[in-house]
Image (spheres, coloured by chain):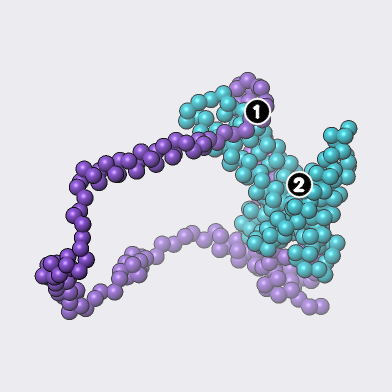
Chain colours: A cyan, B purple
Amino acid sequence: MNALLTITPVIMLLTINLIPFFIALRVLFPARTARTSGIASQQPGRSFATGLVNFVFFVVIGLATASLVEKTEGLLKIILSLLTILSTACLLISLAFGLTGMSGLVGERLAPNQSSWKQVLWGVLLVGLGGSVPLLGWFVLLPYAIWTGMGAFIISLIARNSSRGS
Amino acid sequence: MKHLSDETLNEYLDAALAAAQQADAQSHLAACPACAMRLSEFQNLFTELEAMPDLALDLNLAPVIVTRLGRPAALPGYLRWLAFFQLATAGLALALGWQLIRAIFPLEMPPQFSALAAGFSGLVAADLNLLSSLPKFSFEIPSPGLDLPATTLTIAIVSVSLLWLAGNGLLLTPRSRRQP
């Protein structure tokens, strides 16, 4: 039980570290993060399902290829190692952009008149601290934010062509 | 009622508006037939543009431009000859003045080739010793601790890949293209 309760302060500390990271992402990639926020706002269900499918895919591929690396040698080992690194990189990049988009969305709804970076600041604080609430935060709010943001980011990568073509 | 600008309509099509603006635009479009018509025109225009074939130009100007950009400006002929003349004069002056230079700056005899080779091999040996004393760099993928047979892991990879393909195919295809 004590071990479980240490998750809460860990998430709270992580939240403080993540604030400058998400603000930097928002500043460096304003169009991409704004599109992610917009899609998460307009299509939350589709974003959530897309994020869930891709999250499961990248995690399983990463774990399975990392396990297979130990059982193989030579060229196959190198290919599997590269696959592991690639899937982990994809997961981390989409998580970073997705959570930045979700933080921006929460901040925009919370403080619509504030500047962009302040909206992200409030959004990260709210999502992070809300996600540190035992059980409900860990297993409901945080997964929802992660999967919806990740899905919105992935949809934003292909949304331009589909909206033009429709 | 203030109509939506063309720029706003374009951004609406790209889903590039902020969430609140997107919602405003959507509600305006629902109530304003003129803006809805304009949006429809844009959609038709972009659909037609995408459907147009890519035409190749009759004359490819790229090689000519790239060649001209990469070519340095040519020197006038007399400058090239002047450079050769300067080089030859410098060589002659060095040959004539060598004894004078030796008198002003007494030079030691150049080292023998064997001494140079011995010094070089000593340096190489010292560098190799230094390299061998450094900790060896190695990168290993951290083990996830899954002690499953390779067959099970392969089946898991194939299954999740199929799920991923089917899921993304369903979720990422626009509804308009899914309808028969």
* Residue placed under numbered mark 2 in the picture: A146
* Residue placed under numbered mark 1 in the picture: B156
As helix, strand or loop, the secondary structure at mark 1 comes to helix
- Is B56 left, or right, of A120 in this rendering? left
When the figure is inspected, residue A90 is found, relative to residue B83, above or below; the finding is above
Q: Position of residue B89 (x, y in %)?
A: 14, 73
Q: What amino acid is found at the position of numbered circle 1 in the picture?
A: Ala
Instruction: Let me know if residue A157 appears in the view.
Output: yes
Q: Nearer the viewer, residue B40 or B152?
A: B152
Residue B26, quarter of the rendered image? bottom right
Disc 1 crowd, CA 10 A, few/some/many (<14, 14-19, 20+): some
Please give the count of numbered marks on the rendered protein: 2
Q: Position of residue A14 (x, y in %)?
A: 77, 48
Q: Chain of mark 1?
A: B
Residue B71, quarter of the rendered image? bottom left
Question: Quadrant of the image for the N terminus of chain A?
Answer: top right
* Residue that appears at 21% across and 43% down: B114
Q: Mark 1 to mark 2: distance in Å? A: 23 Å
As helix, strand or loop, the secondary structure at mark 2 comes to helix
Q: What amino acid is found at the position of numbered circle 2 in the picture?
A: Ile
Q: Position of residue A54 (x, y in %)?
A: 68, 41
* Residue that appears at 76% across and 76% down: B3
Instruction: Let me know if residue A137 appears in the view.
Output: no
